[in-house]
Amino acid sequence: MSDTKIQIKGMITTEKKLTSSDLMQLEDKHGAHNYHPLPVVLAKGEGVYVWDVEGKQYFDFLSAYSAVNQGHCHPKIIGAMMDQAQTLTLTSRAFYNDTLGVYEKYVTEYFGFDKVLPMNTGAEAVETAIKLCRKWAYEKKGINENDAKIIVCDGNFHGRTTTIISFSNDPDANKNFGPFTPGFIRIPYDDIDALEKALQTENVAGFLVEPIQGEAGVYVPATDFLANARGLCSKYNALFIADEVQTGIARTGSLLAVCGNCTCEKKCEKQATYAQPDILILGKALSGGVYPVSAVLANDEVMMVIKPGQHGSTFGGNPIAARVAVAALDVVADEQLALNARRLGDLFRSEMEKIIASNELILKVRGKGLLNAIIVNDTPDSQTAWNLCVALKDNGLLAKPTHGNIIRFAPPLVITESQLMECVAIIKKTIENFKK
Ligand SMILES: *Cc1c(COP(=O)(O)O)cnc(C)c1O
């Protein structure tokens, strides 16, 4: 809890414990209004739980957009961070350090690629993948410089940089932020015919796709879409680029969403549905939500087109990030989080189906593993989903609407069956008592 000196009306200076209301006012007054948070002020987290400033406990059903898959403040991850923070934090890449290579070996073996390029945020990793894809296109595929095109999907969310919003079709994301970066072709999501047609246009370098569209509202493509897309990219010599920033690291019931139905804790190629990306983009849960760590993985044929000095980041691959990421991935394997996400995800959707069958308010549940969404029976511009999230909060469960009338449910993957059933009971009670 925060004790601090605050000024009230510019006059009284006092030692006072700030309340949730004080803290919301501070953010509102002094912070840019680029988010619209649910009115809850969190002060502590452990596992699947978070607590507000007044000490009320909640289930976290957002997990910081799937960054906290390993649960809040996992002792193994926090231990690695504390240890490294007291030893060496940042060297820059001007020098070698004693953690980066160890991490690089670990993460490339874990996901089955020759090389990793470490960055910090998801958006930076997507930018890196775009640059890598373009450079490969000019230097390996033989496309004329500045002509490369990358195929993307309607409804995509890949981050907030100027280039990334250039190919978004969400007006909130790009209205009045132009001029935009050219070189992208947008096709409908989960439309294999549209993909093949786009791949036949000249100068296509790659296809950038979310294996499940998270921000758009948890759209799960047809079972064979990713594998077929992989096949088509090979056929037309374009790179298949999977943005698994949200879907990766066990969230959807397999280590990666491109793994199809395999629950192996490390990458394998057993499944017919496995869609090996040429470039894999990871972020969020790569650190268990304790530190910004992102990564781009590729084989040498692609990654080695980048030479010293051509791309980088001061903080990318720093010693804390390296130690934290190893610990975070260890937890995923040790605690079999993919298996847990798969099993409890199936249970969660079947419980939601029961609620839907006896209630008019919710139309549908969809998702994979523990990345799910319910569709509220109202217009996209109504306040119903928001109000339902406020009611869920009052009943001890935190979730947030995404794109209008859709509520995403994504608890930490360390959740147990009995905790999940408690959450189902909260959701059921809230829906049954809800008045529009
Ligand atoms: C969150 C997200 C990003 C961006 O990550 P940041 O760390 O917020 O920059 C990119 N792609 C997907 C699919 C995401 O969910």
Image (cartoon, helix red, strand yellow):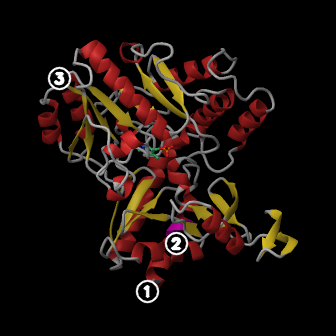
Left or right of 212, for residue 427: right
**Mark 1 vs mark 3: which is more N-terminal?**
3
Contact, mark 1 vs mark 2 (Cβ under 8 Å): no
Q: Which residues are magenta?
A: 422-426
Q: Which mark is residue 235?
A: 3
Front residue of 174/179: it is 179
Provide residue 35's location: percent of width, then percent of height: 51, 61
Q: Which residue is mark 2?
A: 425
Q: In the rendered view, would you say 212 is above or below 270?
A: below
Q: In the rendered view, would you say 384 is above or below 421?
A: below
Front residue of 115/57: it is 115
Would you say the magenta stretch is mainly helix, strand or loop?
A: helix
Q: Which residue is mark 1?
A: 435
Crowd tier of the residue under label 2, counting other residues whose Cα lies within 10 Å: few below 14, some 14–19, many 20 or above = some
Q: Is residue 234 visible?
A: yes
**Mark 1 vs mark 2: which is more N-terminal?**
2
Crowd tier of the residue under label 3, counting other residues whose Cα lies within 10 Å: few below 14, some 14–19, many 20 or above = few
Provide residue 413's location: percent of width, then percent of height: 54, 49
Q: Quadrant of the C terminus?
A: bottom left
Q: In the rendered view, would you say 414 is above or below 111?
A: below
Please identify the quarter of the rendering in which residue 291 is found. Answer: top right
